[in-house]
C-alpha cells in the first residue's frame, strides 16, 4: 500500500471542484481516482496537524468552504493521520538511541508515525493508552463521592487495583451511573454500556484496542475534530497567523540579505552554517530526554549527543528533515534583491507540511517547495510532486504499470 500526503491547497481545490468551481474541475476528477484507490486499499492518504490548523482558519475567512473541505478529508483519509511532531520526536529519539546503544523498546519501527484523528494534534491523550486509566480515575471519583467514612474509602481504593473488585463494582453500578463515567472522554450515545466499560477496563489488549477503535470511529470525523478544537482550544487557530508573522519576519531578513548582496556582490546567506547551528540547537533541545535515557540504560549522554550531531539528526527524522528543509530553503534565496525569489507569507506553513516527507511515499506541494524538498526527501525515498496531475501519473505508473 502506498502512502500519500496532499497539501492543503490540494484538498481545497478538490473541495472547490466538487462544489462546482470551474477552474478546479480537473482536480475534482483526480480525486475520483484517489477515492477509488483508497477504497481498493491500494493507497492511504494522510492528513496532519497542519491541515487541522488551516481548516480552523476557514472558520475565520472561508466558512462556506469548511464543510466540503472537512467532508473531503474524511472521505479520502478515513481519519488516518501522521502523528504530532512533538510525539514523533519523542518516539524517534527512543528508537534511535535503542538501536545505537542496544536497549529494548516496544515501539513498532514501521507503524509509530501514524494514528487516527486526534493523534494529529497532541492535545488529546493517546486513546489506546489512556482510556483505561481515565475510566479507572472516573470510578475512583465515584467511590470518593459515596457517603462512606474515609477509612472505608481508602479500603475500597486499595481494592480498586484488583481486577475482581473492579468487575464486581461495575456489575453493581446503577445504570444511570454508567452514563456518568468517562465524562471527560468523547463518546457516542449509548457507547458506555456495562459490557463496553468492562471490556475497556478488564479486556485483553486486543479487546481494549478494538473497543478503542470502535469508540473513536464513532466519535470522530475531521469536521467534529475541527469543531472540538474550535471550542476547546481556540488558540490553535491562531498558530497559522503566528506562522504568517514568522514568514513575514523571515522575508524581511532574506530581503535584507539580498539587498546586501546587491551592494557588496557577496551572499550573506550561509546555508551550511545554518544547518550546523540548527542541528546543535535541536540536539540541545533533546538533551533532557537523552539524559533520562542514559540514566535508565547506562550509556554516555555525551556520546549520544555526538552521534546525533554527526548524523545531522537523520535518526530522528522529524527534526532531521526540518534541518534539511531549512538549509535548502535558505540556499534557494541567494541572489540580489529583485532578481531572486521573494519569500511568501505562506512559506513556513508550507515547510510544516513538508516535515511529513519521511512518512509517505508521495507528497504533493507547490512548484517552489517541490524544488526545496528534493534533497530533503532523498534519504526517505519520497517522491515530491508539484500538483495532482503529477500524482495521478505516478500512481497510474506504479499501480497499473
Image: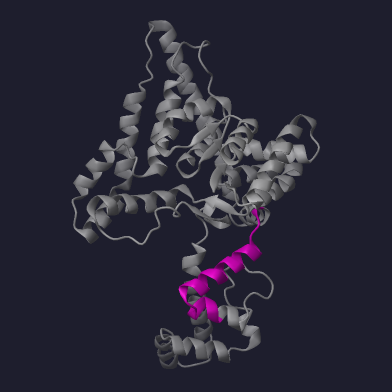
Residue occupying the point 52% across, 18% down: 341
Q: Is residue 7 visible?
A: no
Across and down, in percent, residue 373 comes to: 47, 30
168 over 198 or under it: above or below: below
Q: Is residue 173 left or right of residue 110?
A: right
SS assignment for the magenta stretch, majority = helix
Across and down, in percent, residue 57 comes to: 64, 42
Task: Looking at the picture, tell me which residue is in the foreground, 359 or 87.
Answer: 359
319 over 378 or under it: above or below: below
**What is the tally of numbered marks visible in this picture?**
0
Residue occupying the point 53% across, 76% down: 200
Residue occupying the point 50% across, 14% down: 340
Residue occupying the point 21% across, 49% down: 301
Q: Quadrant of residue 395?
A: top right
Q: Quadrant of the C terminus?
A: top right
Across and down, in percent, residue 6 comes to: 59, 40
Q: Is residue 151 left or right of residue 17?
A: left
Is 209 included in the stretch rendered in magenta?
A: yes
Q: Which residues are magenta?
A: 198-222
Q: Quadrant of residue 217?
A: bottom right
Of all residues, the one furthest to the front in this rendering is 401
Is 105 included in the stretch rendered in magenta?
A: no
Across and down, in percent, residue 180 comes to: 61, 78
Task: Looking at the picture, tell me which residue is in the foreground, 133 or 211.
Answer: 211
Q: Is residue 294 left or right of residue 23?
A: left
Q: Is residue 56 visible?
A: yes
Q: Quadrant of residue 378?
A: top left
107 over 384 or under it: above or below: below
Rendering colour mode: one colour
Amino acid at each position: 500500500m502506498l502512502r500519500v500526503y496532499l497539501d492543503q491547497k490540494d484538498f481545497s481545490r478538490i473541495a472547490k471542484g466538487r462544489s462546482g468551481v470551474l477552474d478546479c474541475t480537473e482536480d475534482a476528477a483526480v480525486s475520483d481516482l484517489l477515492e477509488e484507490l483508497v477504497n481498493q486499499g491500494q493507497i492511504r492518504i494522510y492528513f496532519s496537524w497542519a491541515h487541522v490548523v488551516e481548516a480552523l482558519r476557514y472558520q475565520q475567512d472561508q466558512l462556506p468552504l469548511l464543510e466540503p473541505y472537512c467532508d473531503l478529508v474524511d472521505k479520502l483519509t478515513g481519519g488516518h493521520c501522521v502523528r504530532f511532531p512533538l510525539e514523533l520526536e519523542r518516539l524517534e529519539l527512543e528508537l534511535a538511541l535503542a538501536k545505537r546503544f542496544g536497549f529494548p523498546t516496544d515501539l513498532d519501527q514501521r507503524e509509530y508515525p501514524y494514528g487516527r484523528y486526534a493523534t494529529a494534534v497532541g492535545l488529546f491523550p493517546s486513546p489506546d493508552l489512556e482510556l483505561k486509566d481515565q475510566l479507572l480515575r472516573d470510578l475512583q471519583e465515584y467511590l470518593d463521592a459515596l457517603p462512606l467514612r474515609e477509612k472505608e474509602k481508602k479500603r475500597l481504593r486499595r481494592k480498586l487495583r484488583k481486577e475482581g473488585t473492579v468487575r464486581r463494582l461495575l456489575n453493581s453500578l446503577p445504570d444511570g451511573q454508567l452514563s456518568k463515567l468517562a465524562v471527560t472522554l468523547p463518546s457516542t450515545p449509548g457507547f458506555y454500556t456495562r459490557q463496553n466499560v468492562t471490556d475497556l477496563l478488564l479486556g485483553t489488549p486486543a479487546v481494549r484496542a478494538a473497543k478503542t477503535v470502535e469508540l473513536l470511529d464513532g466519535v470522530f470525523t475531521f469536521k467534529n475534530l475541527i469543531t472540538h478544537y474550535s471550542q476547546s482550544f481556540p488558540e490553535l487557530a491562531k498558530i497559522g497567523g503566528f506562522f504568517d508573522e514568522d514568514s513575514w519576519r523571515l522575508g524581511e531578513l532574506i530581503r535584507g540579505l539580498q539587498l546586501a548582496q546587491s551592494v557588496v556582490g557577496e551572499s550573506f546567506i550561509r546555508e551550511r552554517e545554518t544547518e550546523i547551528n540548527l542541528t546543535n540547537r535541536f540536539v540541545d533541545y533533546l538533551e533532557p530526554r537523552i539524559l533520562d535515557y542514559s540514566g535508565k540504560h547506562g550509556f554516555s549522554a555525551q556520546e549520544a549527543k555526538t552521534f546525533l550531531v554527526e548524523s545531522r539528526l537523520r535518526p530522528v527524522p522529524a527534526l532531521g528533515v526540518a534541518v534539511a528543509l531549512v538549509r535548502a530553503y535558505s540556499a534557494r534565496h541567494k541572489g540580489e534583491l529583485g532578481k531572486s525569489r521573494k519569500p511568501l507569507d505562506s512559506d513556513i506553513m508550507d515547510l510544516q507540511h513538508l516535515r511529513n516527507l519521511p512518512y509517505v511515499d508521495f507528497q504533493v506541494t507547490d512548484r517552489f517547495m517541490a524544488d526545496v524538498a528534493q534533497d530533503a526527501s532523498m534519504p526517505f525515498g519520497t517522491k515530491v510532486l508539484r500538483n495532482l496531475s503529477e500524482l495521478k501519473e505516478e500512481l497510474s505508473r506504479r499501480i497499473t504499470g
